[in-house]
Amino acid sequence: MEFGFPEITDSFLRGQNIVYTQFNDVEFYVEDVKQENFYFEILKKLFPDIKFEKIFPLGGKPNVFTDAALNLGNKKKVYIVDLDFDEILNIRNTATNIFYLEKYSIENYLLDFDAIKKIIIEQRPKIKHHEIENTFDINSFFVECHSLFSDLICYYITIQKHELGIENVNCDAARFCSFNTIPATLKIEQVNQYRQQIEGSLRIKSSKLKLNAQLKTFKKYLRNVSNSLNNIPGKYILNFLKYRIEHLFSLSQMTLESFTYRLARNCEFKELAFLKQRVTSYIE
């Protein structure tokens, strides 16, 4: 007989709140099982006066939408989802118990320079704040992200818009980007091959669909640095950021998960004030 960990099924995820009902004034539901600790850290900071001992990941946005639809009007249940490309693709769910972030994902809210400096100082306790600021210009880094990722994200939006079935946001950034130079560069051969794959799939969909026209349509959502920081997947930016500060400050390598959690622990999340206000208004 073989023993192992039980499979975490959708029905298990939906039912786990039963055990914790007595401990939670409000039940917060999120998408990703792997982000439970991360989200718990953030929500505890945002809602210090609300009693809750656990949050409930449901294993993807479709599951969140399904559960939310079954609990309309239940002010004890709050469903929080990433924006992803839902606004751009006009597929945003308008249910009153669903609360969208205003950026692509929760990771996009971790780009706090003070939090970044704390991580550097944890490994380099003798370094001065001005030394960090002189070595790493956060605004120049953001401009670099805009230049590096914008076209790639337009490819991803095109793929999702026309349901081309080509891997997109789940691609490792390292597939298309080289971070070991300053500024970072695109891997032109890989990007061109990817572009050709998209063009071929568009032709199969319709001879009228041209990739350049699609890119022109979607580039307005990444027209400047601010827009790009909202719409580039946060994991891409954080992966690049982690690599850059490890290189610049000779830090020990961190996993992306550890880096993300440590940023969350050090962030104040002032940009999430809108979420606190909307949720508070809803549950009162």
Image (tube, grey):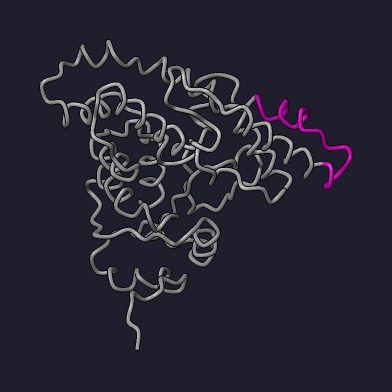
Residue 226, x across and y down, in percent = 50, 22
Work out which quarter of the rendered image holds the N terminus and state it: bottom left
> In the rendered view, would you say 282 is above or below 229?
below
Q: Main SS of the magenta segment?
A: helix
Quarter of the rendering containing residue 249: top left
Residue sitting at 34 percent across and 68 percent down?
17
Magenta part of the chain? 203-219
Q: Residue furthest left?
A: 126
- Nearer to the camera, 188 or 160: 188
Quarter of the rendering containing residue 223: top right
Residue sitting at 35 percent across and 14 percent down?
137
- Nearer to the camera, 197 or 145: 197
Residue 6, x across and y down, in percent = 36, 76
* Side of 237 where 26 appears, left or right: left
Residue 44, x across and y down, in percent = 25, 47
Q: Residue furthest right?
A: 207
* Side of 129 where 95 appears, left or right: right
Quarter of the rendering containing residue 213: top right
Q: Is residue 214 on the magenta stretch? A: yes
Residue sitting at 52 percent across and 55 percent down?
61
Residue 47, x across and y down, in percent = 27, 46
Residue sitting at 20 percent across and 28 percent down?
118
Q: How many marks?
A: 0
Q: Is residue 164 on the magenta stretch? A: no
Q: Residue furthest bottom?
A: 1
- Nearer to the camera, 152 or 82: 152
